[in-house]
Structure formats: C-alpha cells, structure tokens
Image: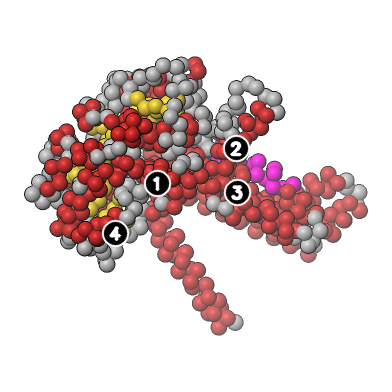
Amino acid sequence: MSSQTARSNLMALPAIAWLGLFMIVPCLIVFAYAFLTRGLYGGVEYTLTSENFARVFDPLYAKIFLTSVRIAGLATLFAILIAYPAAYAICLAPKRMQPILLFFAVLPFWSNYLIRTYAWIVLLNREGLINNLLRWLGYDGEPLSLLYSEGAVIVGLVYNYLPFVILAIYSSLSRLNGDLIEASRDLGAGRVRTFLRVTLPLTMPGVAAGGVFIFVLSIGNFVTPALLGGGRFQMIGNLVYDQFLTANDWPFGAALGMVLIAVMIGLLLLQARASARFSGETAEAKHG
Amino acid sequence: MISGHLILDCASKRENAVKLSGEMRASKKIAGLVGAAMLLQAGTALSADLVISNWAGYMAPDIAETFKAATGLTIEVVNHATNEEIMGKLMASQGKGFDVVFVSSPFAHILNGQGLVEPLSDATVPNLANLYPEARKLAYDPGNTYAVPYAWGTTGLCYRSDLVKGTPDSWASLLAPTDDLKGKVTMLATDRWLMGAGLLYKGFSVNEKDPAKIEEAKTALIAAKKTLLAYDDTTFYSKLVSAEASLVQAWDGWCNYGIAENDKIKFVVPKEGSDLWIDTMVIMKNSEKKEAALKFVNYILEAKNHAWAASNIFYKVPNKPAMESLDPALIAQYPNMGMTPAELVGYEELQDLGEAQRDYSKAVSEIKAAN
C-alpha cells in the first residue's frame, strides 16, 4: 500500500511541479505586487501599501465589477438554457451517434478564438450578413445596430464557451440512472414532473460545473468586450489589461487580478462542495 | 504577436502591399490583446552581433540580409507590441540584452532621463544630416543628442467623402456629430488619443495635466459616447471601407490603408490642431556593441533604407532625401504623405505625462464604464 502511495506521489510530481512553477509561484508574485507601489514607468517600487486593494472598491471600479458580473451571469444563463436541451437531445440519440454529435458540438472549438469572434463581427455589423439578408428579404429601413452592444458581447461569450457547458451537462445526463426515471413514471409522475423532480435535480452538478466554467471564463474575458462590444463596455479583464499595457499601474492591475482570482476560486470551491455533498446524498439514497 | 496578425488578417481584406503595414500597426497597438502574456518574453540572442527591438513590420522584412551584406554584421530582430511592453523589459534589465530599441518619443525621453541611452552626435551618426531641419530640433531632444526620429505623423479625421457632407474640419464633427453621422463615428481607444480628442475639442493641450481640465474633457467624451459606434484602434479604416462608419478618428498613416481600398476616403486634421507623434531609435547605454549599433542607426538613415517605411507602410519619415525620392504618384494617392515638416511641427508633440498618466487612465476607465 505504502509503496503504491509513493509511486502515485512520484507520478503526480510533474503535474505538481508544473502547477507550482507556472501557477502558484506566479500567483504569489502577483499577490506580492498588489501590495507594492506603482513604478512611474512600469514595474513596481518596493514600498508597501494597501492602497491598491482600497482602490478596487472605489465606486467606479466596483461598477465595472458589477457590469462584468451581470454580463458573465447573463452569458451563463443563456448558455445553460441552450446547452441543456442540446445535451438532452444528444443523450436521446442512439448510443453510436452520441460521440459523433458531441464531436460536432465541440468542433467550433478547434478554430481560433479570435477568428470565431471576428466571424461574429462579419455576421452582426451594419453591413454584415444578417443586415444584408434582411435587406434581401425586403426590409428597407435603417440597418440594425446589432454589434457593439452588451447583447453582442453576451452572444460572443455564449457562443465561444457553449461546448464546455454542453459537455458538462452531457456527462451528467449520460450517467443518470435510467431506472430512476422509469420508477418515477411507474409511480405515476408525468414527463414534466419526472424531469423537474428527478432528471433536473440529478443533473444539477453538471449544470453547476458547466455554469461555473463559463461564468469564470466570461468574467475575466477581455477580448470579446473589446471586439464585439466595440470597447464600449469595460469589463474587469479590460481594466486589468489596461493597467499593465497603458496605465503603467502594475500593482493596481495585480490587486484587481487577485480579487478576480479570489472570486473564481470561491465559485469553484462552492461548486466542488455542492457537487461533493450532492454525490454524498445520492450515495446515501442508493444505499437507503 | 500571432494574435495581432490574426486580428488583422481576418478583420480586413487588404491588398498585399498594405497588408504588411496593417499587421505592423495591429501589433503595435493591440496585439497586446493577448500579448500581455508575453511581457516576460526574453529577447536576447547571443549569436547575433546586434539585438534590435521594434514593432513587428516596422522595418523592411529583409533588413537583416541587407544590413549583413552592407556591413558584415548580423542582427537579431525581436518585436514588442507596445511601448509599455519594451519599457517594462528595459527598466527591469537596465537596458541589458538590447542594443537598438524603437520607442515613441515620450518613452525615449524617459529612457534618457533614467540614464539608459547612449548619447549620439553627427560625428558618430553622420547620416543625421539627412534629417529635415525641423526633425533636428524637436522639443524632446533638440540636436538629436540621444534619439533618432524614425517616423512621424499626426492624428485627425478619416472619412468617406461620399457619405459625409462637406469637410469635417473640427473635433466637434467627431464629438458632436450631425444627425446623419450619429452612430457612424469611431474614436481611438488608447488613452492618449481618446483623451486627446476631448482635450482638443475643449481647446486644451494634448499634454494637459490640470485635473479640472482633464475632468472637462472626460465629461465631453462621456457625452460623445452616445453618438459613437465604437472605440477602435485597429480596424477603423475597414469600418470606413465597409461603410459601417462614415467618420473615424485615425492616425494619418492608418487612414492611408483605407484610402488604398477606397479613394473616396479622405484625411483631414481638424482646425483646432492635433498631436505630433514621433517614433524614434535609441541605442542602449549598456549595449556592448555600441559601434555596431551606431552603424545600424546610420544605415537606417540612408535615404534608400529610410524610404522603405514611407513607400511600404505609408508613414512619413523625417528624412529629406528619402521623402524626396518617393514616387509623386504615391503622394497624389495619399495626400497626407505630402504634409510638410513645417505643418507637422505645428502640431503639439506628445509628452510623457508622469503622474498625470494615472488621471488619464482613470478618466478613460470612467468613460468606458459610462452608460
């Protein structure tokens, strides 16, 4: 037993070293920078201060934080509403078709993020495909301003991260014990009731995993608001980016980054705890 | 860098001649989108005689070969996406690892203030004599004692003359557009130029440091957001070509990329004035190859070599024989290439803001967060 533990420790070593070197150490550096003073021309001066964290709560930046939460939250909501039926449909397909359908769901992910985002510019702009299609269909008013709006940012985020959510929900759905649904139906529950009382609660861990995933990726995103939002919507990611690349304020950027990381870690922990408790409950239910 | 190329490659369908320049500019101002991660990229190659850091696409692609043929010296070119990126590296290493660096004039000024750059003179760089007299007495470095101007230009309004009535010759055309232009204008996103539009509109200096005046410009820019299509640093000229926008705030050189695709596109500097930006070459004091570095700078200043930037990426260069060697057809097609040095130095040189940079950054955050 102990030699096995030793071997598994050894095998985990590369991964641990990787995480340590490229994640923990950089995070510690960022954390340390967040308490230093801004160097006038980039970099930091080694004078301790807590001012950077105080500034994060300045109403202006708090507002940007809230905007980010709103945009990421809406993206999460829409992604789940689209991904759940999609994952469900894939689950209902014949077993041998499922990997193929999943493959198609994930396929867009194989192209570059920026190209996919630019494709939306081509679709949505005032002289773009959608407006041209409308014109072709006989619409002759002012072209619709679809791009450079909060909606466009949300569309971009949902589109780009949807495959993750579909996969997460699919993995939950595919592990669902079919007997439970049968039992529910045998006991007289209708389709809707069975879905709401059995299927949905049992697949919540998948929904939560997918949801947390897209939320975390969206809230820190800075490319999509810059491109599809036309820079008109400042998200926390853009703010961090600006601190390093134009404002020369690395410590403030570091402080913002730390707060963002704290939010992400908090959410991931909540999700992990919820799903642990959940699997505990189902295990109990099975034994009971 | 890769990101910058992708951004531009799919953002616009320019002809090959223009493509290079677009890539260069994309890299210069935005590549940073993903390039932030490259802040720590090491930029040294021990094998080459010289290490040069420049924006991607800002020199002839075969510069290493031609320079080697001319001098026998090998060079290694590394790229930076923004001034801030290379400044971070230079501050950290005290300039070690680099011999010649291309930076905008305010940053050259800072590097000189920090004692990181090597003094220059006509004796060590004889081709300085090729520079226009105006380029020899720029405020940040009269006499070219530490920096050599490589390219210069200004910021103005680039517009579709077939969609805009008359000549939009005021910053008010951008900030308070007529009804037919509402929702069809874009502004630059980078803080100096975004704030610049507001400051000039209000009649202030592009280097204004007074918080009250910065506040006024900010208020004007927030009001202007309602009539704005987007903040755009990289694809504004494509928006003109596609008629998505009719009037955009643009750097002169970049407006030329739009003109290349549609000759109805025109450039004008508003009557209230504008900024003068200058990109420069500096030699690092800690360079161990100063002699070779001086040779390189001198080589670039040869008319034929310096003209490359003008004839290929449509940037004005402050080199008299180089500009005089240009094909008149080029200037006819891109009239702002014909702007005289006297006109250019009539605009206000962008200077380092020091601590006031923070007020600018904050104002820009507020503008972008405003509804």
Residue A79 counted in the magenta span: yes
In the displayed structure, A169 sits above or below B278; it is below
Q: Main secondary structure of the magenta part?
A: helix
What is the spatial separation of the Cα atoms under label 4 and label 2, in whole angstroms?
Answer: 43 Å
Q: Position of residue A108 (x, y in %)?
A: 62, 51
Residue B65: which disc?
4
Q: Are marks 4 and 1 in contact (CB under 8 Å)?
A: no
Observer-nearest of A120 and A90: A120
What residue appears at the point 77 percent right and 55 percent down from the top-left corner? Answer: A91
What residue appears at the point 74 percent right and 47 percent down from the top-left corner? Answer: A85
Give the letter of the chain under mark 4. B
Please identify the residue farthest to the left as the structure is shown. B123
Q: Are marks 2 and 1 in contact (CB under 8 Å)?
A: no
Residue A87 counted in the magenta span: no
Residue behind mark 1: B20
Query: Can residue B225 be seen in this snapshot?
Result: no
Residue behind mark 3: A161
Marks 4 and 1, the one that precedes in the sequence: 1
